[in-house]
Image: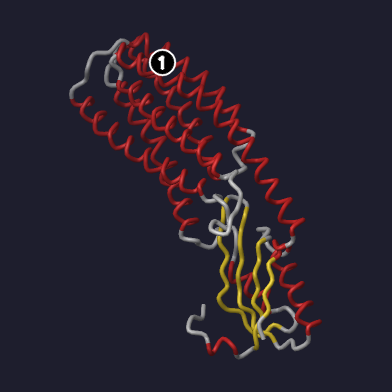
Amino acid sequence: MTTSHDHQHSPQQGGHSHGHTHSHAHASARRLMWALLVTLVILVAELVGAWWSQSLALAADAGHMAVDSTGLIVALVAARLMLRPRSDRYTWGWARSEVLAAALQAGMLIIISALVTWEAIWRLVQPESLDPKPMVIIGVIGLVANVISLLILSGGRHDSLNMKAAFLEVANDAFGSLAVVIAGLVAWVWGWQRIDAIASLLIVVLMVPRAVTLLRSAIQILLEATPSQLDLQALRQHILELPNVVSVHDLHVSTIQTGIYALTAHVGTNATSIEQQAQLLHNLEECARHHHNLKLSHTTFQLEPANHAEHEEINH
């Protein structure tokens, strides 16, 4: 005997959730557009300033800005894709486009970090002359503009991995601009040219850990790893303690996109009547939705006779 149920099959409930997601996506797209415009202005200013002052730190920050501008464009495209409706082919819609965008941004940051590190080490060995005044001026302009971008993005940074990635990029840009200002002041006051290369390496130190963390999070979602906030064994034990439950196997919990989680499980049961099975499904849904620190609203439970698992080829 096999019975399955998906909590999100209800049109009313599913429609509300989908509309709520679209609302967030529209707001995210607007924030990303404004942040992109500000970032492009800073990028042009820093490219001019790097050429004018011969500063590697300013060039590194400009490179960081170039990557972030590309990243914001990717994030904006992802936010637009998330607005596409679900279809028979893409049953989750384009929800995971945000994850692909985050992974792409992380990869770009790692590449630019490697390039800047190579050039910075070379300049530590053979310092080049630089004009610190434009470094300070452009650095201050970049810092102010980054703060404006942070204010624009701050309201949506918890909405999705995509928005979180964009916010963290701009936050690191702000620290990079601050490093440029400090390096420019040191070179201006004390004439120490190597501070430029040191500031460049500091910008790399700011970029790499964030890129690695972001890439790891994206890979975990793409590999459908169990969300780190959830204790799968505790969930399994809680299900086993429900009335009429004999066994649980093929229990999977994965992240579809930020804040949306899906659960599937085969539940062996000794419930024989329709009423008992209906009550068990209700209990399973309540367990998934309320008894754990993640709201598992997309659930599919397959009820089967207690000895059915013995006939299945895969048993997890």
- Residue positioned 50% across, 38% down in the render: 77
198 relative position to 155: left or right: left
Q: To which quarter of the image does residue 126 belong? A: top left
Name above or below for residue 178 compared with residue 28: above
Name above or below for residue 35 compared with residue 235: above
- Residue positioned 44% across, 51% down in the render: 216
Query: Residue 222, how many percent across, how many down?
Result: 47, 56
195 relative position to 172: left or right: left
Residue 11 vs residue 132, the one in the foreground: 11
Name above or below for residue 228 compared with residue 2: above
User: Which residue is farthest left?
Assistant: 126
298 relative position to 174: left or right: right
Query: Residue 180, how many percent across, how many down?
Result: 39, 20
Residue 173 vs residue 95, the one in the foreground: 95
Q: To which quarter of the image does residue 56 belong? A: top left
190 relative position to 157: left or right: left
Residue 173 vs residue 284, the one in the foreground: 284
Which residue carries the number 1 mark?
45
Query: Residue 177, how many percent across, how many down?
Result: 44, 22
Amino acid carrying label 1: it is Ala
- Residue positioned 58% across, 55% down in the render: 87
Mark 1, other Cα within 10 Å: few <14 / some 14–19 / many ≥20: some
Query: Residue 128, how many percent across, how many down?
Result: 22, 17
User: Which residue is farthest right?
Assistant: 275
Residue 306 vs residue 178, the one in the foreground: 306
Name above or below for residue 81 compared with residue 293: above
Which image quadrant: the N terminus?
A: bottom right
Figure coloring:
secondary structure
Helix, strand or loop status at disc 1: helix
